[in-house]
Image: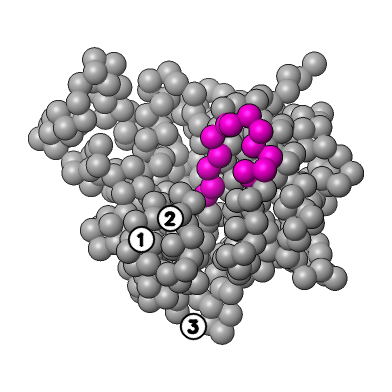
Amino acid sequence: MIPNFTSFHIMVKPYSSICNLECQYCYYLSTKNLYPNSNCKMNDETLEKFTQQYIAAQEVPEVTFSWQGGEPTLMDVKFFEKAIQYQKIFNKHGIKVQNTLQTNGTLLTKDWARFFKKHNFLIGISIDGPSDLHDEYRVDNKGNPTFDQVISGLDNLKKYKVDFNILTCVHTSNVDYPLDVYRSLRDELGGEFIQFIPIVETNGSGSISDFSVTGRQYGSFLQIVFKEWVKHDVGRVYVQIFEVSLAAWLNLPLNLCILAPTCGNALALEHNGDIYACDHFVTPQYFRGNLFSQSLRNIVNSQEQKEFGLNKSKLPLECQQCEVRYVCNGGCPKNRLIKTDEEGVGMNYLCEGYKMFFSFIDPYMKYMGDQIRRNKPAANIMDHLRHNPF
């Protein structure tokens, strides 16, 4: 018998895939084809139903509501005020409730910033580097650049001291400029928490899209950024893949789904209460149920969802014997696009890059892991690495 998830995470799409931008690499825009006769806006009934079930189903002392899209700020502030009200009503046992929101940043007015500050939202804002690199693919519905609008929105977050992360997609436009990207995010935009998301998408014919990065490109990008980070920013700038990877060298759980041995506990909620296995798998094949006909707890702990998560651990022989498997674990299943001789088991399209990167950082991570176990301060670790590169 497959055990139940004791905690799980839902990525909420209150306005489905509707967005004021048309980023050329966006994988979620096509979701609107699933709901051709809908306005794709979440109503109060669905919001209330979800909030009640989500809080009730958690068996941990903290629950996070993650609002995504599309573009969630196309919903007005009143929708999110109602969300906060429902969270207070249904939080009967005093658990900690947090809210995060991922946005393209173009609509972040001072009113939004005041609301986010008042309710302690953590905002993820999408910026792909300096303006020329950002604007290559992140354009509005008329094909116009968006960088200046995004920076205006970011300035509002800063003015009201709203906590924010920067999410940067790595694609063919910016992958050859890793230092320009990283230094722009760090120095010009004040980013202290940064995520790098590699773009790997297929087109209608099933071939890899022109804006996708290769494994070697992504591995080189991460190596170069890591060299900069390890010399100057350890303990000062949080780069998600660097920090999470360190857990592998400390023999701790990998809490980033793409690196974890299994997945399945991060699902997606559509505007009408439909639940899907993951927001990268919002297709009829991965439909798991609807809040109005099934309980969220039962949906999350369904046999098919458990099997979906466990399937991540099914790796081809080459992966099983790989020297970096303990940190990579085959990567995200959506990117297992390289066919192997083993039926139904593919290699990750970014495999070459993961091998390059994780092999490169091995001596650094071994050193940092050893120093952390000895309770050495970050400043001492950074000083050593700056003057003693491996």
Q: Could you tell me if the residues under marks 1 and 2 are in contact, i.e. CB atoms within 8 Å?
A: yes
Residue lying at the far right of the rendered structure = 293
User: Hey, which residue is sitting farthest left in the picture?
Assistant: 387
Under circle 2, the secondary element is helix
- CA separation in Å, label 1 and label 3: 28 Å
Image height check: is 338 above or below 314? below
- Examine the rendered structure and indicate whether residue 270 appears above or below residue 343: below
Give the residue at mark 1: 160
**Looking at the image, which residue is at 64% across and 37% down?**
91
Residue at disc 3, secondary structure:
loop
Q: Mark 3 sits on what residue?
A: 144
Q: Helix or strand or loop: what does disc 1 sit on?
A: loop
Upstream in the sequence, badge 1 or badge 2?
A: 2
Magenta residues (range): 87-100
Q: Give the number of the mark in front: 1 or 3.
A: 1
Amino acid residing under circle 3 = Asn
Q: Which mark is in front, 2 or 3?
A: 2
In the picture provided, is 287 more to the left or to the right than 331? Answer: right
Residue pictured at 66% horizontal, 33% vertical: 92
Front-lying residue, 258 or 21: 21
Give me the C-alpha separation between circle 2 and circle 3.
30 Å
Q: Establish if 328 lies above or below 41.
A: above
- Residue at screen point 49% across, 83% down: 144
Of the residues under marks 1 and 3, which one precedes in the sequence?
Answer: 3
Residue type at the position of mark 1: Tyr
Q: Amino acid at mark 2?
A: Lys
Residue at numbered disc 2: 117
